[in-house]
Every structure is written in C-alpha cells, then in structure tokens.
Image (tube, rainbow, N blue to C red):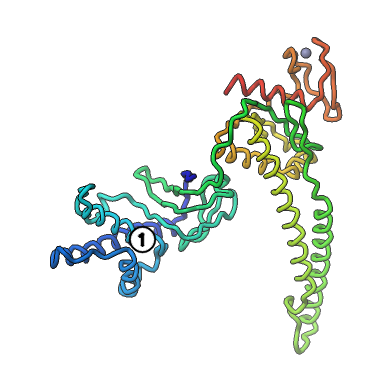
Amino acid sequence: MLAGIKLRLYPNKKQQGQLFQMFGNDRFIWNQMLAMMNERYKNNHHLPFLGKYKLDILLKPLKHQYSFLKNSDSSSLQIVNANLNQAWKNFFDKSIRARKPKFHSRKSTKNSYTGKSTVRVIGRRYLKLPKLGYIKTSKTGLLKDAKIKRYTVSLEPTGKYYISFQVEVEKKELPKTNKEVGIDIGLADLAILSNGIKYDTFDGSYFDKKATEWQKKFSRRRHLAQRLVLQDKNKKVLNPRNLESFSNWQKAKIVKARYQNKVKNQRKDYLHKVTTELVKNYDVIAIEDLKAKNLQKNHHLAKSISNASWRMFRMMLEYKCEWYGKKLIIVNPKNTSRICSNCGFNSGEKPLNIREWTCQKCKVHHDRDINAAVNILNKAKLTG
Ligand SMILES: [Zn+2]
C-alpha cells in the first residue's frame, strides 16, 4: 500500500540557494523539451512524439551545455521528462482530450521538484538528500522501515519548505481485535500492560560489557600512541612516528563499534517484536507522555529509561499504529502511579521500592505497575 508522509524541511542559507536553482532547473528542462516537441509537432503533425527514453538521452547534451543543470538531483530531471511525456500522451489521447502542454513560468508553477534517488535517514531530525547533503527536518521516525518510492521537495507560499514522501508500506491494515490496553513503562520490565502481561527489558549487558572493555582498550592504546608520537617529536628523531602508524588502537575502535552495533541492532529487533505484537493484539494502545513525567531528576532512573529504549519503543508504536490502522493515545502521566485504579483514591507518591500496595479506601491490593497501566488506559478512555 502506498502512503504519504510529509515533513518540514529546514534548509540552511546555502541549501536554500541550491533549492532555488533546482526548482528553476526543473522548469528549464520542461520548457526546453517542450519547445523542441512543439517544433517537431509544427513541422509535422504526424511525427511520433518523443518518448521518455529519448527525452532522457537528451539530458546529457543539455547538461553539457548548461552546467547549472548538474546542480540538480538528476532523477528530478528524468521525472520532468516523464511528466511531459504523460502530458503529451494525454494531449493525443482522444478520450482524455487534454490541452496541449504549456510552458512553465516562475509565477504559474509551484516551486518544487520530485525525485526518486536514494534518500537516507541520518538521525531523528536529519536526512541526506542528493546534491543537498545533510538537511534538517521534522521527525523522521515515520520513515523508519518505509520504502521510499519518490519525494517532492517544495517551497510553499508561506515561505516554509516541505518534503513529501510517497512510500510503500509493506503490510495492510491489521484485523480489529476490539481490545484496548494501557501500558506503563518500567525499569525491570520494558512494558507492563493493564491486563497484567509484562515484557522484559532487553538484556544487552553482555555486549555492553564487551563494548565498554574495548572502549577502555581503545583509550589506553590511543593515549600510549599519542605519548610515543610526542616523545619522537620532542627528541626530534629522524623519522618521527605519527598516530596512524599505530594500528592497534584503531583496531580497538573498530571492535568496540562492532559490539555497540550488535547491541543496538538486537535491541531494535526486540522492540520491533514487542511493538508489532502490541499493534496486532490491540486496537487502542494508551501510553504515558514520559516527557511530562520529567524523569531527568533521577539520574539512575533516566539512564535505565534510555536503556529500555523508551523513545524507540514509542516511535515504533506511533508509526505502526498509523500504518496498521490502530490508535495510539498519549496521556498525561500525572497521578497515574498515585491513584487507585479501582476507586480513584489518591494515596500520594510511593517510593520506587514499593512494588505492591493496598488501597486504604477500597482495600484492593495492587501491583504498582499494573495499577498504573490501568490508570493510563482509564485516562485514555476519558480523552480519546
Ligand atoms: Zn481504592
């Protein structure tokens, strides 16, 4: 299934200049090709019009003649050709009776170009686009796992830049289960569901330990190499060694990176497994907005949370719910761990080591995390 994803783009000054050129180049190619086709048509109405393939071949000499065309994402010029070819086809198609293609002017056409080259997601807010390089965007999370078919970069009349992606989404909507769930995010457990199911935190400690080991080796070896290089320099030896001539610290760096990568990939796989299962099993999923919970106050807790990859967990839920036709509700975490989910009595904050407690008012015994998860679900029902 094809889906559209639209993100804001924040090009820097240089990139804005490049984009101005790229938008103009698209118009330029359209007009050049159209002028030529008009000429052919005028000379002989019965000549077959030039197909897309022939138009693409003409791009090379044009680029040679007008070197500014080389600043374009080259796939965008091919797409201009494809569009022109289609417009021309429509003109000849008696059932459509389209008008003859017109020239594009800066005023009449949108400032945009469409490309189909490789776009790489670099970080949560960065993409790498052909010719433009690294460019700042709004959240790229939705693009994870999406197969990008094509993209359109545009400058809207508001002065804002956008990029719209046409993506291929692998699976279609999942069947409805008529089930809802609240999820509390924990430390020992990654996720605790309102129905009592718990998902463990991913245990990457083995590879983490290995990575730390090699990080230490790397620092030590590098430090030693630096000292020897300095020694050579101070002694003014004939052939002073440089940092690169010591290979073992570089090796340590590579090994360290491999372990880090391994733990990262395995954690990601695990989170994929859990989030896919959740989206399959429930139609409505409620989670807390942890940003509002302000966990930074507790350093240890914050670290554990990042280990639990809470952010990635939430992001995966966000896009999977969107793609698979399920609903994600983010609730304010206020009081979710204080209120009794049975009677609503607020018995105040409880220290983290209190795992279970009994409500003073209704005497129901609670598992701390499950109670919170139920509260989260109840809140979602009120808001959603
Ligand atoms: Zn109660």
Residue at the image position 58 percent from the left and 45 percent from the top? 141
**Residue 341 picture location, percent across and down:** 74, 18
Q: Is residue 153 above or below residue 158?
A: below
Location of residue 292 by image quarter? top right
Q: Which residue appears farthest toward the bottom when viewing the image? A: 238
Circle 1 is placed at which residue position?
A: 21
Q: Amino acid at mark 1?
A: Gln
Quadrant hosting ligand 1: top right
Q: Nearer the viewer, residue 30 or 43?
A: 43
Q: How many marks?
A: 1
Helix, strand or loop status at disc 1: helix
Q: Is residue 31 left or right of residue 180?
A: left
**Residue 146 picture location, percent across and down:** 55, 49
Q: Is residue 87 left or right of residue 215?
A: left
Residue at the image position 51 percent from the left and 55 percent from the top? 135
10 Å neighbourhood of mark 1: few (<14), some, or many (≥20)? some
Residue at the image position 64 percent from the left and 36 percent from the top? 280
Q: Is residue 35 above or below residue 143?
A: below
